[in-house]
Image: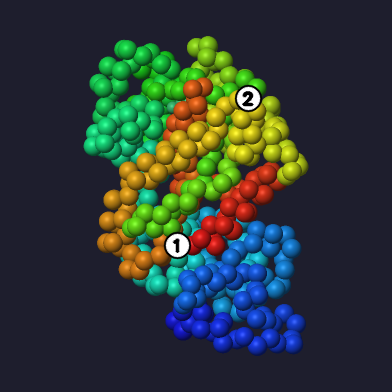
Amino acid sequence: MKQQDMPVGMARDLEETGSSSEEEEEMEGPEEHPCIMWTGGFRRIPIMVFHAEAILTKDSYIRLIGERYRLSFKIVRTDSRLVRSILSAHGFREVHPSSNEYNLMWTGSHLKPYVLRTLTDIQKVNHFPRSYELTRKDRLYKNISRMQQIYGFKTFHVLPQTFILPAEYQEFYNSYSKDRGPWIVKPVASSRGRGVYLINNPNQISLEENILVSRYINNPLLIDDFKFDVRLYVLVTSYDPLVIYLYEEGLARFATVRYDQGAKNIKNQFMHLTNYSVNKKSGDYVSCDDPEVEDYGNKWSMSAMLRYLKQEGKDTTALMASVEDLIIKTVVSAELAIAAACKAFVPHRGVCFELYGFDVLIDSALKPWLLEVNLSPSLACDAPLDLKIKASMISDMFTLV
Ligand SMILES: Nc1ncnc2c1ncn2[C@@H]1O[C@H](COP(=O)(O)OP(=O)(O)O)[C@@H](O)[C@H]1O
Ligand SMILES: [Mg+2]
């Protein structure tokens, strides 16, 4: 997209093209187009609205919007079929990963400062610089600890007690002598349950690399005796000022073996880890083929899980309020570092946005615990429920950015 096609130009253009054309597939009164919403009061500003259904209907009228304004995107170091189909359905043209002629870059990894510096005000990328302050488990722990020191331990008690080894081995050992666990060991920067295991004795830890050891939450809330955690989708569109959106729907992911606190089970990953990547390997994994059924098998929608808890008499309004509190406090703990990096490296406002995947575990007292924040949360759609939730979530995200 060229400079004269900037959003301001787009506004003028649309206002002048009031007359309707007889030709089919021409955009008529632009105000009528389902992908344009007007905002901004007197000086009206067009906002592009994305529709999840477009990936199924492949409506050519919807596609006209991106084609008409020559919008383009590139996908780098990731294979996001969902992002590609939503953008293509709205007429965005895909350019080569090495091209600089794009409006939106969707990348699987952090951007180098020299790439960020070259971005113009008609381009957007899906990461902020220094987002690893949240998404690396060791950095997250450091940032939350700092907030606990400044604002009080209780206010920021959102993470299970954690130590980074080998640096904090002595402190860990002191805690271990008071509470023999189990504890859970994780690599400082990994995902999908890789390298995660439970211990009840420090000599079970292999100290080859930097690892993190956390108190194991051994009283998880159970549904039908199974442990589960929740994946929440959090969008940040700006760090200065901080703007956070929480998507209304999420996923509850269940373990495949009934929960049992007995020490003889601590090696059973299918009981203690709730990652889909882990449990799909279990012969007991149950998937659901009907997108309308949201509370069957090993993956439920978050709203189905909340409805279930409500029926059991649990206060789900209070639960979600504490989940929101946890999310805000977590993002705030990295706010200054990321805002400073934006100021240093990003020449225009509104260029960066980021979708984070929060993993939250709810204990039997209904307290939510933050397990980790994921950079590039999985957009894979193995089950119809994944597609239903993630396509709407990604469409809303693009509308917001
Ligand atoms: N402190 C904890 N207490 C109880 N269960 C935990 C704890 N930390 C992690 N888990 C379990 O282990 C899984 C993987 O941990 P997580 O921190 O999300 O790492 P990964 O990046 O490998 O997904 C979680 O989904 C959860 O089921
Ligand atoms: Mg995880």
| Image-quadrant location for residue 17 | bottom right
Q: Quadrant of residue 144?
A: top left
100 relative position to 223: left or right? left
Say above or below: 97 vs 389. below
Q: Quadrant of residue 343?
A: bottom left
In the image, what residue type sits under mark 2?
Answer: Glu
> Where is residue 61 shown, x and y percent of the image?
70, 73
Q: Residues within 10 Å of mark 1 (few under 14, many from 20)?
A: many
Label 1 residue SS: strand
* Residue closer to the observer: 131 or 249: 249
Which percent across, then down, holds residue 338?
32, 53
Kindly identify the residue that appears in the image at 23 percent across and 37 percent down.
Answer: 150
**Residue at mark 1:** 125
Residue labelled 2 has its Cβ within 8 Å of some atom of ligand 1 = no
Q: Amino acid at mark 1?
A: Val
**Residue 312 disc label:** 2
Does any portion of residue 185 appear in the rendered image? yes
Q: Is residue 109 visible?
A: no
Q: Residues within 10 Å of mark 2 (few under 14, many from 20)?
A: few
Q: Residue at x 50, y 26 (%)?
A: 366
Residue under the point 55% across and 29% down = 315
User: Residue 58: x and y, percent?
Assistant: 72, 66
